[in-house]
Image (spheres, helix red, strand yellow):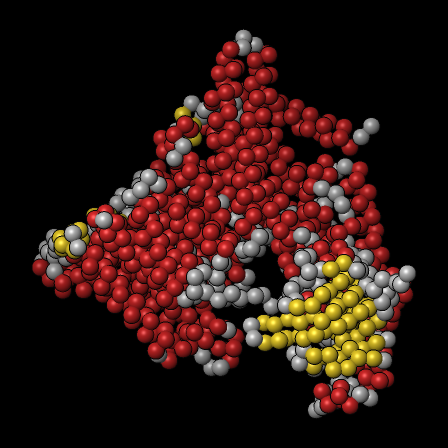
Amino acid sequence: MRNWLVRDVLGITVISAILIGLSYLLGWLPIPGMAYYNRVIVTIGINIILAVSLNIINGHAGQFSMGHAGFMAVGAYTSAYLTYFHFQPFLATMKEGPAQFAMQQVLFLAALLAGGGIAALAGWLVGLPSLRLRGDYLAIVTLGFGEIIRVLILNIDKIGGARGLAGVPAFANFFWVYLFVCIVVIVSWRLIRSQVGRAFLAVREDEIAAEAMGVNTTHYKVQAFVIGSFFAGIAGGLLGHYLVYLNPGMFQFTKSFEAIVMVVLGGMGSISGAVLAAVILSVALEALRFVKEAFGLTADPRMVIYAIVLILLMRLRPQGVLGNREIGSFFRRRNGRSE
Amino acid sequence: MDSFLQNLINGIGIGSIYALIALGYTMVYGILKLINFAHSDVFMVGAFMGYYGARIFSKLMYGSSVVEPGWTLFLLVLAFSVACCGVLGYLNERIAYRPLRNAPRIASLITAIGLSFLFEYGGQMVFGPDPKFFPQLLEKKQIEFFGTSITSHLVIVLVVALVFMGILQYIVYGTKFGRAMRAVSHNYETASLMGIPTDRVISITFVIGSMLAAVGGVLYGLSYSKIDPLMGIMLGLKAFVAAVLGGIGNVPGAVIGGLVIGIVESFAGASALSTYKDAIAFVILILILLFRPSGIFGKHQAEKV
Amino acid sequence: MTILNVLDAQGVTIRFGGLTAVSEFNLSIRPTELVGLIGPNGAGKTTVFNMLTGVYKPTEGEIRVNGVDTKSLKACDITKLGAARTFQNIRVFKTLSLLDNVRIGGHIHYKYSWADSVLHSVKFREHEEQAAQEAIELLSIFDLAHRAHDEARSLPYGDQRRLEIARALAAKPKLLLLDEPAAGLNTGETAGLMAQIHEIRDRFGIAVLIIEHNMELVMGICERILVLNYGKTIAQGHPEAIQNDPVVIEAYLGEPADA
């Protein structure tokens, strides 16, 4: 028997059970305005998925992508298309009850995975030209791809075009979002501690040396794009099914930029840094909403603050809060390495 | 035939504005190997300086902030905007980029992105997020031209753009400063060892680029009349594509690249593809980078091992 | 049947624009041979390395590594044929640990997919154990095992050079190409390096091609030497013959022969 598989399945089950427990707990907590906090918590989760997945491309493989919002849009629209036009009508034919509930969860998972899959396909397409491009050229091309994707969606009337798609079924919730938070963190963590992850790092550090060591740099760059955009697509799917509304304007390159700020702030290449930065920035973002209201500002101060954070960060601590290390390594260092 | 000519002329009009912006991108990239994302926002600031300059000078000259069209006013406003943006360009380089000269390139790139967003959303706070109507600095006349009518503004845009491109061409290829600039662009360290004050050259390059962007901003306001703090984003990206198309670092290349993008867009906008207009520049960009990464006029450079 | 050469280069020529950087370069290396490639600065030695390892494509000529024509192969595929190299201007993976550097060196031997990595399959764990073990062994050869978890950039210069050799060896090559391994090393370190190169050759049974300016090292360990000048091979043979070759002396004129 393959006991490693058993262990992982067990792990996922335990995580799921904990998450289900937590989501009931969140529902029962007698805190006024709990619905609002719930929404913030879910937003944080979606941002964590975005940041950790972008970190695979930008932080680990060192390919500066500015098109993450594009992949997110692909995932969001693909999964919403499936649930809105196919799964929802099908579920409506079923009798209400546990069977329908279970079917809804299964179909939602399928839609999310399909969204991730198509986003991964888009990532593969974008990854291909990146074979020949480095640094800032790649940045501008990925940005361009993101914009092309958005313009394409604007022109597809079936999924709402510029009007947006209202009435996406409300399938996403705390459980699904944090299940994928756990999955993306575990996948990213395991990858980086494997030969695949080390190949990503080698590409980031020195492409010529990596190639000389037999690392097919092309292959790994594309692979990083595919894995990263898969999870961006999942994040998009979760977002759409949580907000029950989609609009191409949600995926402008300011969205990619938000993800970049998270990765850079946390420290490019640090998974825990990406998680930390996603939490900090999402909370700061909510706080800034109050600032905007309190001062009666007409413009959103959020992007200005992001910009200043980014500029100061490059000046004072260009490696980000955690650098390319993980949170654990700081504690280990303190305990001494005298041996 | 009419509409063909009309599209062509419209394309040249917007193309020359792309070209003015592209020049700033191409010069800075040529020297620092940096995509100065904030450059497109200097263009936006240039347009707003034109907007406020027009009111200030009207007040000074006629005692009323209602703008009376006239050449004196136009030239004063242009000079004002150019001066403001020159200072802004200098400050950008001095405060944001120079401290990062020896940092990894990615740090400068991220700073450039941050600066760009600072201007865009800071601009929304300072200038207000809503579009503003650019004052009519010059009277608009219709001119008959081979059976189509074009506006006098278009002619002015073309003439002013050409004059400034000519000046730039002279500076880069006809002066001692231009030689220093090309030397720094060729090899930063060696130029510095040869006694070229590289920091000053880089500063002046930023200043010149920003001044050209200001010219572009005022001309844009003049001919399209609506300006807003986020206008630099798309225009800037397309101008950058123009610079890449012409071969980044190449001055005439940027001008031709700008015109090509402008014309292609103009024709696409008039065709069945009109709703895809904003994506066309990026499709062109991807195609060039795939098939001729060094652009039309660029030289291919191999990495040293 | 004759023993297959690890390297066969025939009439290899490369031009950059109008400049012929290397012309008509011929070299065959038998298994376990120690060959030196010397010549004044700018003679084209590193360009030869870059062609042999696929960084540059020769304009003319044929290169075979372990009998396979490398014409249409990428650098990473040539490594798979059994040729691994070091770089003149050290290219270790600076922010990665020594252990990771060497494990990346062995990349071509660890064949599991991203799915194995994510699921921690048996295949993954077997390969990982093997990779760590082999990496530590290689680091031990160069007395670097005690720093396995430090970042490569924290090493002194000489150790970074040796880490690069360890990394190249992790690819288990048949031919090891060393580009100025002794550059920047002092006399004591150079002597140590000579001993290590011998040890490596005997222990792993591989051929070594060395570019080096340090004549003591080249003359001391190479069995055969090739001299390049202005991209042309001006002499080749035993170290003693090369040392007394008037053409070689002329090429190096003005430079002391032991510099």
Quadrant of the rendered image containing residue A148:
top left
The C terminus of chain A lies in which quarter of the figure?
A: bottom right
Instruction: Identify the residue shown where x is 66% and y is 23%.
Output: A17
Q: Residue furthest top?
A: A95
Residue A203 as seen in the image, left or right of residue B52: right
Q: Nearer the viewer, residue C248 or A96?
A: C248
Please state the horizontal and vertical placement of residue A179, each as a whole percent of the image.
61, 30
Instruction: Identify the residue shown where x is 68% and y is 57%.
Output: C73
Q: Nearer the viewer, residue C241 or B81?
A: C241
Q: Nearer the viewer, residue A288 or B206?
A: B206
Q: Nearer the viewer, residue C217 or C26?
A: C26
Instruction: Identify the residue shown where x is 9% and y is 59%.
Output: B62
Please state the horizontal and vertical placement of residue C29, each as a whole percent of the image.
82, 68
Quadrant of the rendered image containing residue B243:
bottom left
Residue B187 as seen in the image, left or right of residue C138: left
The N terminus of chain A lies in which quarter of the figure?
A: top right
* Residue B291 appears anywhere in the view: yes
Instruction: Identify the residue shown where x is 33% and y is 45%.
Output: B268
* Residue A317 appears anywhere in the view: no
**Considering only vertical position in the picture, is A29 above or below A218?**
above
Please state the horizontal and vertical placement of residue A230, each as a whole percent of the image.
57, 37
Quadrant of the rendered image containing residue A14:
top right
Tally of marks? 0
Please state the horizontal and vertical placement of residue A237, each as a whole percent of the image.
51, 31
Residue B65 as seen in the image, left or right of residue A318: left
